[in-house]
Image: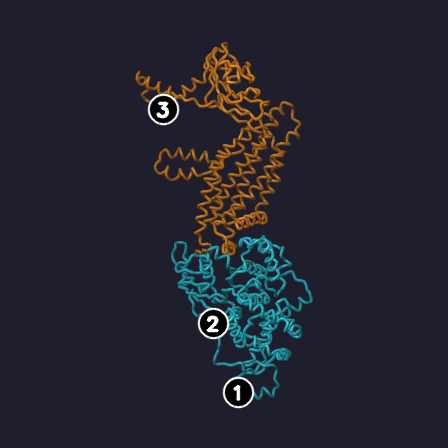
Chain colours: A cyan, B orange
């Protein structure tokens, strides 16, 4: 079995009350999703994304063709035990409290009481709803319900995570967190099928994507292959004096190249996160979800595929310079685990191997990165991480940069798997 | 199994927290005590008790039936409509487990509520006499005729077919058969004549009738001979004097020496009305074969006949009121289980309002099943071919709630035997309910959960 999910000319036609065919929702879909891959299913509204997921999970019967999920039928309880599913809306029992909800789903997985309790607490902590765990889910805002929905999808520590529009209704921190979580889970050998029309989400995390339209795949491939603009180059540097800029301009003019010099804007996402984290540090009360950045212990500790990575990551904690931690503290609290600052540095360093004229926003980051440069030797072990991306984004706006980084991450991924 | 349990608990939580059950519970909690105070019946204590038990149990039964239908239908259709089922069915739970879990939840909820309300009715019934200071006779009446569970035994059916045949052949040989009657009509008439003959006594003669399996709970109690006599010639005062001998058959028939006492008294009662004679239960011999003998006094100067249907029966206390009450409640539980299965069947292919309507129609038809079956049988005589293969089997599937109606037994303090309870359990639960559940499981297993019809 080389594919976690495979569909063979999967077709779904919705018919009217008289049995006449009306809408072809999915049309001869041939999809292959490999193990340990983050696959994004994109498409405008009504392009057949959700229908495809429902077909995979046995909620709908295909009109034609078939689908194989984790080597079996998506409706088979044995397969279901290894799947986490988050539907397009978190369909929850309004009368249950958050904790009861998770307990109910945990029981459906036949988890032993001890494991169940441990995971529920861990997940509540992770999605930031521990403080409201005893409130009925019906009183939750959409985003809070979404968080519980996510938690229920993770309670069985699934091998395959199927997420339908996971970030709808979530605040930017929640969105960020889900994306980090997806990356983290992929790092642990999980397969993730992500369904969304929010392109930024998909772009940030997915290894491969397929774009659906009219139930057919219109484009499919690796994100970097699809998006890389080979005919353009971009430099990002720290702040330069006008004279240096002039010099570079002259060089470029000599090359007869078209260029543009600007200071990049900070992404609203990272600015928002900064603001909220500051508010949290001041311990301002909230009746809603608490933004956390933990990822459930059991989700990060139970995986076995890349224990080497774990060792490497934990070993590097000691190398971390305290200065780093303090300087980057606004981005994310320390729970993320010690590995992150290092990854950040490394990815930063790898970026700098590209020919890049400096174009900085925060100068001190540059200063900070330089002393640690020798660590680049370990870069292939380091992949995506929360801090990595957060800080990177706060520095750079440029999409091409991010993409090239991710390419590196992906190569790292492959070597891990 | 654990997942079934999880679904069951969730269903109970749903019913309790969505306040579906609350409305019914509050209504009953208010109505039952009010009924206890306001129901007067015919003014006597017995009447009061009978009306209260009858109305209280019927009301509880009807409201719980409605609750069962609503909860079982709502629980499944809302899951489908609000799509919680998407997250549930994609967990490692089989579809049948989901339905069985829902059913278990509804039944558990019913058991809890039924225990609660029957406990309330029971306590009100038991404590009611304390509030009314009844006279000694009233006390005795309710003790003997209400707070008891009396089994009634009729004399075993006599086999007269041989005799009837003989008579028939004799008439045939003599060519005296009536021309305008069919064979079966002649036979049935001859049979009833023969049978009546066995229940008739000429003046001065004795009619011994044997009752088998008489097992009174307590030999110090009384048993009751309930009878009604008919006469060939009506006496001037419309009364008949008779000597009643009750005891061991061996003594009455053959005069054998026996250990148990013999009841032997003369009574004078009016004809064509039902009377009861109280007899000490100690007269019943150990083998349970009780002989009731009636000696027609020569002064009556007429033949006395005990009609076949309600001429003579022996009533005795077979169990306590509490035991009978528990069995009555069990009968209610069976109908609730049936309705829960019906609700699940309905919601497996119908939407909420339609499924409710479907269940209600069946519920009310089942409540009057006797009437329905009889009227269909009557109609069916004309269209037998089509009828007996289509509607008849479906009608037979109705659970016949009226046949196993608990108030029918509790009001006259009639003993509900465990055999009757077992019969109700087998027919209503193990055959009819299970059949409904299986159909529901079958439909639900192949159902397209996220189906969209345009």
Q: Against B420, is A164 above or below?
A: below
**Residue extending furthest toward the right:** A282
Marks 1/3 in contact by CB < 8 Å: the verdict is no
Q: Closer to us: mark 2 or mark 1? A: 2
Chain of the residue that carries numbered disc 3 in the rendered image: B
User: Do marks 1 and 3 both belong to one polypeptide chain?
Assistant: no
Left or right, residue B160 beside residue A207: left
Q: Nearer the viewer, mark 2 or mark 3?
A: 2
Specify the subunit that label 2 lies on.
A
Crowd band around label 3 with a 10 angstrom C-alpha radius: few (<14), some (14–19), many (20+) = few
Nearer mark to the viewer, of 1 and 3: 1
Which of pointers 2 and 1 lies earlier in the amino acid sequence? 2
Q: Chain of mark 1?
A: A
Q: Residues within 10 Å of mark 2 (few under 14, many from 20)?
A: some
Residue A138 visible? The answer is no
Residue A283 placed where, x, y %?
69, 65
Please give left or right for residue B292 compared with residue B197 in the image.
Answer: right
């Amino acid at each position: 079995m080389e594919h976690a999910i495979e569909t063979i000319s999967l077709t779904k036609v919705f018919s009217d009350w008289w049995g006449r065919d009306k809408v072809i929702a999915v049309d001869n879909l041939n999809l292959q999703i490999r193990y340990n891959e983050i696959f994004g299913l994109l498409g405008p509204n009504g392009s057949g994304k959700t229908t495809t997921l429902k077909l995979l999970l046995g909620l709908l019967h295909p009109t034609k063709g078939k689908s194989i999920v984790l080597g079996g039928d998506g409706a088979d309880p044995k397969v279901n035990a290894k799947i986490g599913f988050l539907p397009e809306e978190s369909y929850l029992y309004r009368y249950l409290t958050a904790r009861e909800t998770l307990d109910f789903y945990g029981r459906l997985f036949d988890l032993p009481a001890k494991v169940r309790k441990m995971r529920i607490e861990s997940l509540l902590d992770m999605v930031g709803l521990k403080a409201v765990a005893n409130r009925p889910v019906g009183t939750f805002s959409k985003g809070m319900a979404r968080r519980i929905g996510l938690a229920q999808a993770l309670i069985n520590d699934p091998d395959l995570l199927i997420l339908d529009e996971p970030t709808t209704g979530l605040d930017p921190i929640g969105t960020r967190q889900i994306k980090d979580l997806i990356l983290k889970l992929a790092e642990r050998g999980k397969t993730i099928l992500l369904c969304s029309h929010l392109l930024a989400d998909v772009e940030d995390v997915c290894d491969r994507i397929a774009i659906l339209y009219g139930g057919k795949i219109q484009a499919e491939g690796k994100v970097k292959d699809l998006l890389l603009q080979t005919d353009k180059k971009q430099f990002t540097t720290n702040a330069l004096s006008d004279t240096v800029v002039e010099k570079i301009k002259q060089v470029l003019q000599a090359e007869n190249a078209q260029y543009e010099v600007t200071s990049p804007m900070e992404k609203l996402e990272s600015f928002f996160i900064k603001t909220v984290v500051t508010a949290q540090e001041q311990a301002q009360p909230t009746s809603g979800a608490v933004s956390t950045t933990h990822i459930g212990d059991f989700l990060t500790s139970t995986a076995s595929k890349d224990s080497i990575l774990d060792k490497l990551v934990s070993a590097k904690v000691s190398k971390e310079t305290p200065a780093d931690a303090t300087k980057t503290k606004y981005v994310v609290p320390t729970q993320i685990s010690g590995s992150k600052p290092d990854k950040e540095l490394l990815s930063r360093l790898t970026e700098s191997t590209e020919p890049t004229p400096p174009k900085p926003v925060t100068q001190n980051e540059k200063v900070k990165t330089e002393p640690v440069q020798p660590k680049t030797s370990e870069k292939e072990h380091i992949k995506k991480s929360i801090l990595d991306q957060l800080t990177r984004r706060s520095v750079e706006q440029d999409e091409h940069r991010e993409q090239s980084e991710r390419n590196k991450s992906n190569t790292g991924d492959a070597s891990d798997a | 199994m654990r997942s079934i349990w999880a679904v069951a608990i969730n269903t109970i939580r749903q019913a309790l927290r969505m306040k579906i059950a609350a409305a019914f519970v509050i209504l009953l909690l208010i109505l039952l005590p009010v009924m206890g105070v306001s129901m007067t019946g015919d003014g006597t204590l017995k009447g009061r008790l009978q009306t209260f038990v009858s109305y209280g149990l019927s009301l509880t039964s009807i409201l719980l039936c409605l609750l069962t239908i609503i909860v079982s239908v709502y629980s499944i259709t809302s899951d489908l409509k609000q799509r919680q089922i998407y997250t549930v069915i994609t967990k490692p739970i089989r579809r049948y487990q989901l339905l069985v879990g829902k059913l278990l939840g509804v039944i558990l909820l019913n058991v809890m509520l039924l225990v609660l309300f029957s406990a309330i009715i029971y306590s009100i019934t038991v404590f009611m006499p304390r509030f009314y200071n009844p006279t000694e006779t009233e006390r005795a009446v309710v003790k003997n005729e209400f707070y008891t569970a009396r089994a009634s035994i009729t004399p075993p059916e006599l086999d007269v077919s041989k005799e009837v045949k003989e008579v028939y052949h004799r008439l045939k040989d003599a060519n005296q058969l009536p021309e305008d009657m069919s064979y079966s009509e002649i036979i049935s008439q001859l049979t009833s004549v023969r049978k009546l003959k066995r229940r008739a006594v000429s003046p001065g003669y004795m009619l011994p009738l044997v009752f088998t399996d008489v097992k009174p709970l307590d030999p110090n109690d009384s048993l009751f001979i309930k009878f009604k006599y008919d006469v060939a010639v009506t006496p001037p005062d419309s009364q008949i004097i008779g000597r009643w001998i009750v005891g061991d058959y061996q003594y009455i028939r053959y005069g054998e020496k026996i250990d148990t006492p013999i009841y032997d008294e003369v009574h004078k009662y009016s004809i064509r009305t039902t009377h009861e004679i109280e007899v000490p239960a100690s007269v019943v011999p150990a083998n349970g074969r009780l002989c009731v003998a009636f000696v027609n006094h020569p002064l009556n100067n007429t033949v006395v006949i005990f009609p076949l249907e309600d001429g003579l029966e022996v009533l005795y206390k077979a169990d306590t009121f509490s035991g009978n009450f528990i069995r009555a409640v069990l009968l209610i539980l069976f109908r609730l289980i049936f309705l829960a299965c019906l609700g699940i069947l309905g919601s497996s292919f119908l939407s909420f309002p339609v499924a409710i309507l479907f269940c209600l129609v069946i519920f009310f038809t089942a409540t009057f099943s006797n009437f329905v079956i009889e009227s269909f049988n009557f109609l069916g005589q004309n269209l037998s071919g089509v009828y007996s293969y289509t509607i008849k089997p479906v009608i037979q599937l109705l659970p016949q709630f009226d046949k196993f109606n608990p108030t029918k037994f509790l009001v006259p303090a009639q003993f509900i035997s465990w055999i009757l309870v077992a019969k109700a359990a087998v027919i209503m639960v193990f055959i009819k309910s299970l059949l409904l559940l299986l159909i529901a499981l079958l439909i639900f297993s192949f159902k397209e959960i996220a189906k969209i019809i345009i």
